[in-house]
Every structure is written in structure tokens, then in C-alpha cells.
Image: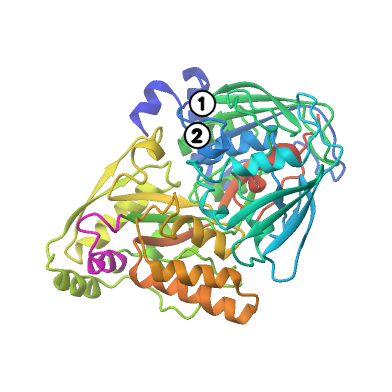
Amino acid sequence: MDERILKEGPRGLDRREFLTGTALLGALAGAGAGLSLASPAFAQSATPTTGGTLRLGMSGGATTDTLDPRTFTDWVPVNIAYQIMNGLVEIDADNKATPELLESWEPKPGAKDWVFNVRKGVEFHNGKSLDADDIIYSINLHRGDTKSAAKAVLEDIVDIKKLDTHQIQITLTDGNADLPYILSDYHLFAVPNGFTDWANPIGTGGYKLEKFEPGVRSITKKTGSYWKPNAGYVDSIEVIVINDITARINALLSNQVDIINRLDGRTVDLLKRNKKFQVIRSQAGQHGVLLMNCESDPYKNNDIRLALKYAIDREKIIKTVLNGYGTIGNDQPIPRTNPYYNADLPQHGYDPDKAKFHLKKAGQENLKVTLQVSEAAFTGATDTAVLFQAAAKDAGINLDVKREPSDGYWDNVWMKAPFCASYWGGRPTADQMLSIAYKSDAKWNDTNWHRPAFDKLLIEARAELDQAKRKELYGECQKMIWEDGGALIPMFIDYIEAGTTKVQGWKPHPMFDFMGQRIGEKVWMPS
């Protein structure tokens, strides 16, 4: 067990609470298949009830977090934001774009001009009525001179025009049938026109912010007048940041939280055998990735990148680290469940001889590299790196694994280290995923892979309305990343969450974990 955790306890829990949980985890592990199976504490109810406090034990938070949507890099601030603010468009359980504050939309022929109707009868927490100016301001926070990660996905917007108090028109450089999906991006939250006080965000969500300690915890309280029907059931929501997986499970077992995210694949079967708990599994686009900076030595040489891709045993990692809760990756980010997935690409497999061939070609037959990892990147990232280290030896690669602390990982390591672990939660469309991480000018182009030919192909694909041709173009984009990119993607990782059976209405979702991070307004807890 991590020495820091033993000394300090997990972030957000005191030492006494943590030690109680540790004992419980030991009991669970020791019981194994013989664990006493209690009856569910609460019968499943199809009828929502109100009241209670929902306590989320979450990985994905840091002391550097803010509630400014332009800064979001991980799930804790996104989850809190969805409690307080609403998005423009929501992705539903069928992965379809569905109205939120943008109530309806219609493209003009060619999908270059779009008219959106802004929902009427919605008020911000300060009493201001939502109108078109608020929506335009909120979108423009991510356009022009901004550091927002959503800037790249909105770059094709050339004009946003107010047509009346509750209607806007968005004009694109070229037609794009995916615009409503683009507007579902988790950075795009609505705030009042001119709003800047991000320490005290004002939104139209079902909850108001009561307390926010970055990297530690947050508390929100129900407003009592939420505009959304059939949502916002619990009285309050507490998010406790627990980045360590063992501490997270302990907190659930000792009843200090109601649900946890990023469950360890090796522990999930133990929890599934205990009827006090439920496990939610979602197969989506989440993937672990080992990032090679294509502008840094030795990774600027594609033979080095290919050698490392052939030196990792992906199947062993899925079996050992994920316990089978995932699928093999092929060094491009579009999952098999996406209609534009390129199934014709040969699978990059574990092949030390091929790795040696590329090392010799690069003149680096005794390659020594350092991989920086943290559990902040994804649960099991450290074990993945250790297995990679062992497999790479047979290819003549000396891989040094450098473990980094979770807190501050996204500020201090990601997009700074030449070779490091990371993850992507996936996106609802192929275009969004490829635009935000692989287009040359994307803020989150985290491999520094710049290929004008790829950019041209991507822009051509998004404007193509013939679906067969569009699939061909996106397939070619995937091939370019597969054969030349700096992303080593060993696996797609199922979202696995666990919680007590008293949490009702909790379901799998194709976008991210915790129901696309909107779980706070969707579940209820019978008393």
C-alpha cells in the first residue's frame, strides 16, 4: 500500500475514517467467494423519491482545479459543474444529441447555417432569465483569444448571430452535420452574459454551490425550482476527491461514500458478489494512452514510435490489469462501437522481432527511455507500465518507469513529459475525438503530431454528407494516426463504477462515467 496513504489517509478523508475502511477492504479481499452476501438494503424502485445526500467518491480531482469551464481537464470539476450549470446539448443513453438549453435546432441546406432555439422559462440562480445573449457569450468564451480546450472543436464557427431573444444562428466555414454533437462538449456551460466570477459560478442547474475545496471536496444544495422535469431528486450532493483506488474502495465499503468511479478491474468481481453493492459497466470510447512527443528525441523518429508499439503486450495488460474489462487498442482513438471505426487496419501486436527491426533502422538497438506514469492517468496505469517494462526487455528496450503523484499530474507531467501515460474519455463523434487531440492546432494535441495532410482530410470528412464517403475519409484519418502517430493506445477501458444499492436510477452511459458526469441530477435515494 502506498506509504503516503498510510501516513496521511486519502485526500478528503481523515486518518481514523481511512483506517476503518482499510480493515473493511481486507475483510472483503479475505472473504473472496465465501463472502457473506447480505440482501439488498433497499428494493429497486422505479418511482423516484426526493431527499437525502448523495456522496460521490471520485478520482479525477486536483488542488489546481477551478470551476471555470475553460480549464477543465478531468472529471471532478466537470461533475460539479453539471450540478450547478447546464450544457447546451446533452448526449443521451443512446449516444444521440438531445436538447438541453438549446431546445431545438434546424440546419439550412448544406448544414453550413444552423438555427437554434434557446429554451424559454429558464432562470439562472441569480434570477436572470436565460436568453440568446447568454448562450452567445457562453459559446464565445471558447472562441478567439482563449486558452479553452474547446477552442479547436469550435474553430469552424465563423459567426454567431442573435435572431431574436430566444433564437440564434450559427454559421460555419463548411457544412457539418455534427454541430449539435460539437455543442455537447463538456466545456460548454451556460452562464449569464458577461459573467466572470468563476469562484462562485452561477448557472441554471438544479444545485447551488455551497463549498468548493479544490482537490478535496465540494458540496452543493438543491435550488428547489429546477426547470428540468424528472431530475434533481436529492437534497444535496457531496463530492469527495479520492484519487487512490484502494482508498476509494475503502470509502465505499465503510459507508463514507455512496458510489465511486474508476473501479479497479481486479476488484470488481469481489464487489459484484456482495448484494449490498451494484456495479455499473459502460463500454464507451475511454482509452488509456502512452503519449510520445513527436517533436522530442528519440520519439521524433517514427521507427522508435513503431518499436515501442510492437514492444508492448496488449493482451496481457487487458487480462492482467483490466481483468478483461476492456478491449484491445490499435494506436488510433476511434472505438469499435463507432460507425466510422476502421476495421481494416492490421492489429499492432506484441512482436519483439519487429520492434528490434525498427530499433536497428533507427540506429537505437540499445534504446533506453523513461515512461512517467500516475494513477491519475487511468486506474492501473502503473501496473500497465510495469508490464510494458518487462515485455520491452525482449526487444532490447530498457524502459524506466517513473511514478508521479496524482495531484498536479495534469499540470506538471501531461503535455510536458516526452513519454507519459494519459487517457481520453472518448467523444460522441469521430470528428470531435480526432479534432480535439490530433488536429495540428488543437490545444490538446498531446503528442505534438502535426500533419497538414491529416488536417485537410479531417476538414474534408466533416463536410462530407455522403456517409460511405465520410467513413472512407475518417478511416484514412485513423490509418495516418495508426502508422505515424505518437499515441500508443494499448486498450479501450470499460467504465466501471460501484455503489450501494440504495442509489436508484443509476445506469450505464455511452459518454464518460457517472452517466456522462450528470449523475447528480439523475439518481435518487429512498430513505
Please give left or right for residue 85 compared with residue 243 in the image: right
Q: What are the residue bounds of the magenta stretch? A: 293-309
Q: Quadrant of residue 447?
A: bottom left
Using the image, tell me which numbered label, if any, was put on residue 485.
none
Are there few (<14), some (14-19), or many (20+) residues within 10 Å of tag 1?
some
Q: Are marks 2 and 1 in contact (CB under 8 Å)?
A: yes
Name the residue type under label 1.
Pro
Name the residue type under label 2.
Gly
**Taking the image as drawn, is residue 39 in sight?**
no
Q: Which residue is mark 2?
A: 61
SS for callout 1: loop
Instruction: Give whichever of 135, 91 is nearer the camera.
Output: 135
Are there few (<14), some (14-19), or many (20+) residues within 10 Å of tag 2?
many
Residue 303 highlighted magenta (yes or no)? yes
**Taking the image as drawn, is residue 77 in sight?**
yes
Number of marks: 2
Question: How far across and how far down the image is residue 444, in percent?
Answer: 44, 50
Q: Quadrant of residue 352?
A: bottom left
Question: How far across and how far down the image is residue 342, in percent?
Answer: 51, 76
Q: Which residue is mark 1?
A: 214
Question: How far across and how far down the image is residue 67, in percent?
Answer: 57, 31
Point 45% across, 54% down: residue? 442
Marks 2 and 1 sit apart, C-alpha to C-alpha, by: 7 Å
SS for callout 2: loop
Q: First in sequence: mark 2 or mark 1?
A: 2
Please give left or right for residue 366 compared with residue 116 in the image: left
Point 39% across, 37% down: residue? 411
Point 69% across, 32% down: residue? 84
In the displayed structure, 415 sits above or below 180; it is above
Please give left or right for residue 171 compared with residue 12 in the image: right
